[in-house]
Image: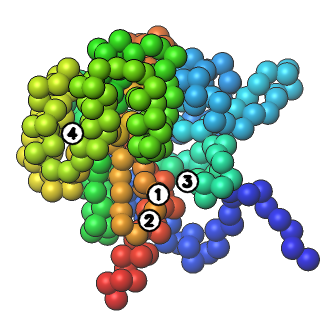
Amino acid sequence: MIHPIPPGTRDVLPEEMRELRELTETLRARFDAAGYGEISTPTMEYEDVLRRGDERAAGAGYRLFDEHGQVLVLRPDMTIPIARVVGTRYMDEEPPFRLCYFGNAYREVDRRSGQAHEFLQTGVELIGMPEPQGDAEVAGLVIEALTEAGLTRHRLGLGDGSLYRTLLAELEVPEEERMPLLEALSRRDLVDVQIGVDRLGLASSASELLTRLPTLRGGPEVLDLGRDEPVSPAVENLRACYELLAERGVADRVIFDLGLVRELGYYTGAVFEVYDPAVGFALGGGGRYDDLLGRFGRDLPACGLALDVQRVHVALTAEEREGS
C-alpha cells in the first residue's frame, strides 16, 4: 500500500541526508568565517507581519489558525522574519548586522511548475551597509561559499530591481499597466512583455527601449548600452558593484542581466540570481531591500541572498558525476 505525501514535498533518506549535512556545514563555516552569525526564527509568522513586509510574500504562504483564531503563515522565505527580528531585537545596537540562517521554507506554487512547496533554504543578510559595498560583499560571499562547497560552474546573474520600474515611471506608464509588465518580466516571458508594451501605445523609441532592455545580458560591455538611458544611475551602481567583485577575484562568475526582476516587490536596487548549468531552476536569489527594515521600526539599508540547498546539492552531484 502506498501512503502519499503532499505534492511538492519529499522524504530525504540517510545517504542524501549525510551529503546535505556536509554541504550545509561547509556553507555555514564560510558564512561564520565572514562574520555572519546564525539566526533562527519561528517556522510560523503572523500573517499581518508578513503583509507588513510584502503583500505578495504573505500571499505565497500556507495558512493555519492558532487557538485564538489569528491567522498564521508558514514562512515563505526568511528575509521578512529577519527584518522583523532586527526591528524588535536590534533597536539599540550599532549596525552593520551580519546574519545567516538555515531552515525550511514553505511556498504555494503552481503544481505544474515543478517547484517544491517545502525546501531547505540558507542565506545571508547584511543590514546597515549601503550599496554598492553591501551588494558586493553579499554576492561575493555566496560565490565564494559555493566554490568552497565544490561547485565549479556556477554563475551569478546581476541586475537591478529598480531599473525597469524607474523606466516605466520615467515614461509615465499608468500604474495599472506596470505590474503585468513586471510579472511578465519576472517570468522571463518576453513575448508577454512585447504584447504589453505594444498595448501602451508609446512612441516607437520608448517601446524599443522597454523591449530592448530585458534582452541586455552578458559581460561588462552590457552596461555601456545602458549608460545614456534614464536608468543610468542604476547601471553605474552595477558597474561599481562589479569593480568591487573584481577586487575579490570573483568577477568572472558574474553575468549582467538588465532584465532581471525578482518577483517580490521590496527590492530597491541590485538583484541577484545564482545559476548552474546542471539545474533548470535558479539555485537562489536575492538583492537589495533598503525600504523593508523601516516597515519594522528601524530604517536601515540592507541586502541579502538565499540559496535552495537541495538545488545546490543536485548541481554538486551532477558536476561530480560529469567529472568522474
What residue is shown with label 4?
Answer: 136
Residue at 52% across / 37% down in the picture? 78
What kind of residue is marked 2?
Answer: Val
Marks 4/2 in contact by CB < 8 Å: the verdict is: no
Residue 2 found in image quarter: bottom right
Instruction: Check disc 4: other Cα within 10 Å, few if <14, some if 14-19, many if 20+.
Output: many
- Binning the other alpha carbons within 10 Å of mark 1 as few (below 14), some (14 to 19) or many (20 upward) gives some
Badge nearest the viewer, 4 or 2:
2
**Tag 3 or tag 2, which sits nearer the N-term?**
3
Q: Residue furthest bottom?
A: 324
The location of residue 168, given as percent across then percent down, is 35, 20
Residue at the spot 29% in from the left edge and 48% down from the top edge: 157
Give the image location of residue 159, x and y in percent: 28, 38
Residue 279, disc = 2
Residue type highlighted by circle 4:
Ala
Is 122 placed left or right of 127 in the picture? right
Query: Disc 4 on helix, strand or loop?
Result: helix
Q: Which badge, 4 or 2, is on the more N-terminal residue? A: 4
Q: Position of residue 319 (x, y in %)?
A: 36, 76
Residue 241 showing in the rendered view: yes
In primary-sequence order, the first of circles 1 and 4 is 4
The residue labelled by disc 3 is: 120
Separation (CA) of disc 2 from disc 3? 16 Å
Q: Which residue is mark 1?
A: 281
